[in-house]
Image: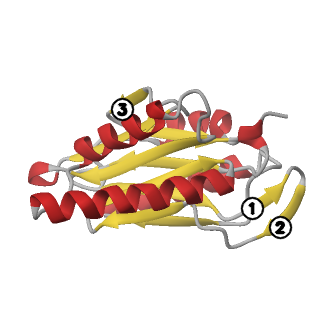
Amino acid sequence: MSIFEYNGSALVAMVGKNCFAIASDRRLGVQLQTVATDFQRIFKIHDKLFVGLAGLATDAQTLYQRLVFRHKLYQLREERDMKPETFASLVSAILYEKRFGPYFCQPVIAGLGDEDKPFICTMDSIGAKELAKDFVVAGTASESLYGACESMFKPDMEPEELFETISQALLSSVDRDCLSGWGGHVYVV
């Protein structure tokens, strides 16, 4: 079993019409044993920017603390919030500088940029970005999430339809993965 699969996770982000949604499961496990059913994987950086961290739970929490620290420094220096594209580059740089002893995390970044244009991306544990125009997935349920999202996604969805689509994709995918589940958290912005 890979260290990325040790705690289990399912993360997905989707874009809609001037909006985005990001969702994750709630299970924290140690291999096949469930430890908690209310684990937080999605974190708010500011009102229009969220990051989800799949992978090893301890590394995810450590990485989140570093990201909050770096964002607060940016706010103090620049007197504004970070754009999603800038934040993605920051996350990529932080992961790449630890490439020889990496954080075992797959970040999913979702935010609204200029003129409320949605931005989503994911990356691997050493910061190689994967940008997308429709949806991105991460975690142990990523294979089934790809299939569910491919079949359910439509471009330019309104927030209500986007919520329903991402919720159904997440729930149907975690049913096919024994390392993730116990419901989900969904954020629509």
Picture quarter containing residue 81? bottom left
What residue did someone put label 2 on?
35
- Which SS class for mark 3? strand
The residue at 44%/26% (across/down) is: 128
In the image, what residue type sits under mark 1? Leu
- Mark 2 is surrounded, within 10 Å at the Cα level, by few (under 14), some (14 to 19) or many (20 or more) other residues, namely few
Asked whether 173 or 77 is in front, the reply is: 77
Whether tag 1 and tag 2 are in contact, CB under 8 A, the answer is yes
What residue did someone put label 1 on?
28
Q: Position of residue 171 (x, y in %)?
A: 65, 56
In the image, what residue type sits under mark 3? Ala
Q: Which mark is residue 86?
A: none
- Mark 3 is surrounded, within 10 Å at the Cα level, by few (under 14), some (14 to 19) or many (20 or more) other residues, namely some
Q: Position of residue 181 (x, y in %)?
A: 73, 58
What residue did someone put label 3 on?
132
The residue at 78%/45% (across/down) is: 177
The residue at 55%/34% (across/down) is: 125
Regarding residue 165, the answer to whether it shows in the image is no
Picture quarter containing residue 155? top left
